[in-house]
Amino acid sequence: MILDFIFGMFSNDLAIDLGTATTLVYVKGKGIVVNEPSLVALVKDTHEILAVGADAKKMLGRTPGNILAIRPMKDGVIADFEVTEKMLKYFINKVHNKRTPVRPIVVVGIPSGVTEVEKRAVRDSAEQAGAREVFLVEEPMAAAIGAGLPIESPTGNMIADIGGGTTEIAVISLKGIVCNTSVRVGGDELSDSIAAHLKTAYNVLIGERTAEEIKIEIGSAFPLKEELKINVRGRDLVTGLPRTLEVSSEEIREAMKDSVSQIIEAIKDTLERTPPELSADIVDKGIILAGGTSLLKGLAERLRYETGVPVNLAEDPVTCVVRGVGRLLEIDDGLLREVAVYEKEYF
C-alpha cells in the first residue's frame, strides 16, 4: 500500500472505456483527456501504424488499397490483439507523463458478458501497452457509478449501457450486480441495418460513416412528433455511378426495428429476472440509460411504452463508463478492488 502511494505520486494513473466505437481515457486528477474513435489506420503489408483515433476516422472509406482503416474492437471485445495493443499504447503515451519512469495503474471498463479468455486479452493488452497494474470493471457497474447511482445502498438500481457494439443491462444493489444481461447489439448493428436496407430497397451502396450520419440525424425508435427526411449520397450498384436519394425517419425506423427490438427485449428480460423487492425500487426510481446509442431519438419513450417503468437518460451518457472507472481511481482503492473482476486463472 505504501509503494502504491509512492508510485501514485509519480505516475498518471488512467481509467479507460475501451469501446467498440469510441475510446475514452480519464487521467487521475485531470478528468477526461481523450475521446476518440476506436480506429487504427495501418499499412496493409507491414502493419505500420499511420494514424489512430480521430485522424484514422478521417481516412475511413477513403484509403487506397494498401492502407486499412480498421476497428480492433468488435462487439465490445478485442478482435485484433496486436492492433488493440498498439492503439492502447498510443493513447497511454499520449496522456502519460513520459518524464516519469513509473508505469501507470490502468482501470478498464469491459462488457459483463465477456469470457475469461476475453478478459485476459484486455488485461494483457493493457500490460503490454505499459500498465503497471490492471483492474477490469464491468461496464454496467462503471456506468452506474458514473451516473451517480447509489450502488452501495440496499436498494435496486437499474442501468442500461447501450454502446456501439454491446448493450449491457444490470440491476445493482449493495455494490454488486444482482442480475444482468449482455447482448452484442448496439449502435453499429443499427448502422449496418440502415446500410443493408438502402442496398436492398434502392440498390444503393453507402459507407459506414454515411450510415452512422443517417442514424444520428433521423434514426428513431418511436414515432416522432414531426417525422424527418434526409438526402443520402451513395453508389448505384446497377450503373456504378453516384446517386442521391431521399429517405425518411419512418423508413429508417423500420430498417432498424429488429435491432432495436433485441435491445428492448434484453431490458425486459432483466426486469423479469429482478427480485420483487428490487423491482419495486426500479418502478419508483426508473431505468437509467447510458452509452452513446441511448441518445437514439425516441428510445426512452419506446422503453417507457414497452415496460411501463420510468426511463431517464443519464447526464452525459456517452462518458458515463469512463467517469465511473475514473471515480474509482479518484477515491480510495477499497471500492475499486471490491467491484473489479479478475480472470480465474490468475486468482
Image (spheres, rainbow, N blue to C red):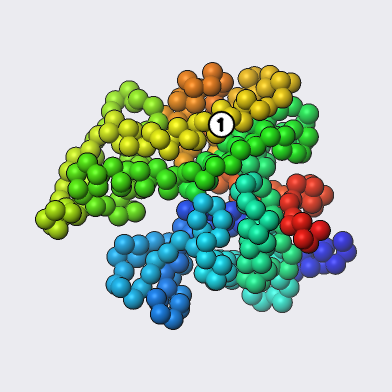
Vertical side of 179 occupied by 117: above or below: below
- In what quadrant of the picture does the N terminus appear? bottom right
Residue at left 31%, top 62%? 61
Q: Quadrant of residue 267?
A: top right
Is residue 15 visible in the rendered structure shown here? no
- In what quadrant of the picture does the C terminus appear? bottom right
Dot 1 surroundings within 10 Å: few (below 14), some, or many (20 or more)?
Answer: many
Is residue 270 visible in the rendered structure shown here? yes
Closer to us: 154 or 269: 269
Vertical side of 222 occupied by 346: above or below: below
The residue that label 1 is drawn on is: 267
Vertical side of 1 occupied by 226: above or below: above
Q: SS class of the residue under badge 1?
A: helix
Q: Quadrant of residue 68?
A: bottom left
Residue at left 49%, top 22%? 306
Residue 202 x, y percent position in the rendering: 19, 44
Amino acid type indicated by mark 1: Ile
Residue 304 x, y percent position in the rendering: 50, 22
Residue reaching furthest to the right: 2
Residue 218 x, y percent position in the rendering: 32, 37
Q: How many marks?
A: 1
Vertical side of 282 occupied by 42: above or below: below
Q: Is residue 91 left or right of residue 248?
A: right
Closer to us: 175 or 253: 253
Residue at left 78%, top 29%? 154
